[in-house]
Amino acid sequence: MGELVDLTDGERTALEKLEERQRPLRRGAVLLRENEACNELFVLRKGLMMSYVLLDDGSRQILRFLFPGDMLGVSSAIYREAPETLAALSDCVVSPFDRAALAEIMREHPRLSALVLVYSQIERVALTDRLAALGRTSAKARVAALLLELRNRLRATDRSIANVFALGLTQEEVGDATGLTAVHVNRMLRQLAEDGLITRGSGRVTLEDEHALARAANYVNRYEGLDLGWLPQPRS
Amino acid sequence: MGELVDLTDGERTALEKLEERQRPLRRGAVLLRENEACNELFVLRKGLMMSYVLLDDGSRQILRFLFPGDMLGVSSAIYREAPETLAALSDCVVSPFDRAALAEIMREHPRLSALVLVYSQIERVALTDRLAALGRTSAKARVAALLLELRNRLRATDRSIANVFALGLTQEEVGDATGLTAVHVNRMLRQLAEDGLITRGSGRVTLEDEHALARAANYVNRYEGLDLGWLPQPRS
DNA sequence: CGACCGGTTGATGACGATCAATCTAAGTGG
DNA sequence: CCACTTAGATTGATCGTCATCAACCGGTCG
């Protein structure tokens, strides 16, 4: 959260309290399963995770990829049963904390509650972008948008990442995120390569023409263009 | 918000302050256009609205339908430019209020800020349901899910609504919400009718077999099953 | 009355799913 | 160290869902 505003000491210690405990997760581990009860939330400290739902025909829709610094399970916390599954895509570290700790922050730190709302809204807008992508854009555009989104989110925690990055996903996972089959994802990646927009090799992707890619994908980086000057003042 | 918790007098008056002003909107009117700046938020008092985005090929994706009691423009408030357009589907009344008024509430009423977050998360989960629908379900299921969602949200403000209700949308609008063409929406409605799941007539739809419809649509009512016992206590 | 909007129906075609086979690289056990 | 297994990537052939194009109908409004 320190990236959006300058935190006070009081706010910083309140947030650090959420990260007191740590729990490691193996690649593939499920942190929380759809329809299970859960009184905890989490902060992702390291690694890449995803949230998804399974439909009753067995197909999977990946809803979101989760990166270090993201708060996990907010939506599960307000329901008796979790609406989505949280699973690790790589070895991860998470910090669990109680719902009461979030309540405490909302009581004592108005600006932090505002920031929780802000992140929730950023996520909401990113979801609507993907909704529009699934509803109204071609398979190629959806894959291109996913590549751009992944690269930008990875770069947020690792500034050394430029145009080359490790995908960290199987083509089946890309398909489950974009509403396509693994076979068609493969063809789309190949087409993007043939168009000169990307190059691929040994699990790595290079964005060769980021601008053209963003145009083809209708992509907007939703972590930019914020206006937070109006947030409530910190109490301490 | 009073439907989720018992509000204190202090909370109630704080919320009433948001509804001091009123602005009527004609059917078709645009309250806020994508990429425009906006320092205001709104509460929808009466009528049906929608939010949508236009893609550069001219196609439209409807992101969400808005019902009385909904807070509008939260996502626009945190960006310099609105990420989506807000438009009236029927004659409406909205109450505009300043971003500062929201900040004030977050400073003085921790439980109300928690409830704003809760509504934001309910909306988020509803969006992920639609994301999964667009990514992984058939045209028929998507239309069925939209019918159920509309009926349930309409009933929340008008308890007299049972299984018959006025759609209030053109088939083109249904298509823009479900990622289909108007022509195909028409065929899906006809198929649902042939299957005995609905009947139609003069702008009205009757859900003949709500249970089978919900099963065909993978539908979950996200305004139920909440667990809010852990929210912060009201300060006044 | 004519124009227009929205709904309805038919004919055709494209995009992406499905099924199937092959290939490669990374393990794993003997 | 090598045979064997396995997960994932790749490619081809075929099929189905939904888009597109086009025509027509009915109601409403200027």
Image (cartoon, coloured by chain):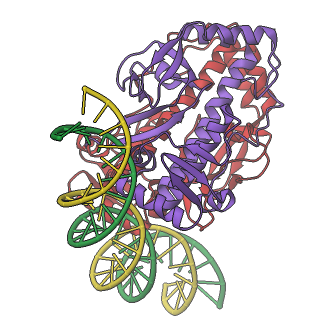
Chain colours: A red, B purple, C green, D yellow
Residue at the spot 47% in from the left edge and 62% down from the top edge = B190
Q: Is residue A17 visible?
A: yes
In this view, A106 is above or below C21? above
Horizontal placement of A127 versus B165: left or right?
Answer: left
Residue at the spot 60% in from the left edge and 36% down from the top edge = B123
Quadrant in the picture for residue A19 = top right
**Residue B26 x %, y %:** 42, 22
In this view, C14 is above or below A197? below
Q: Is residue A9 visible?
A: no
In this view, A157 is above or below A86? above
**Residue D29 x %, y %:** 32, 30
Is residue C4 or residue A127 the one in the foreground? C4
**Residue A3 x %, y %:** 52, 22
Horizontal placement of D22 versus D17: left or right?
Answer: left
Is residue A92 or residue B81 the one in the foreground? B81
**Residue A188 x %, y %:** 32, 61
What is the quadrant of the N terminus of chain B in the image? top right
Horizontal placement of A30 versus A141: left or right?
Answer: right
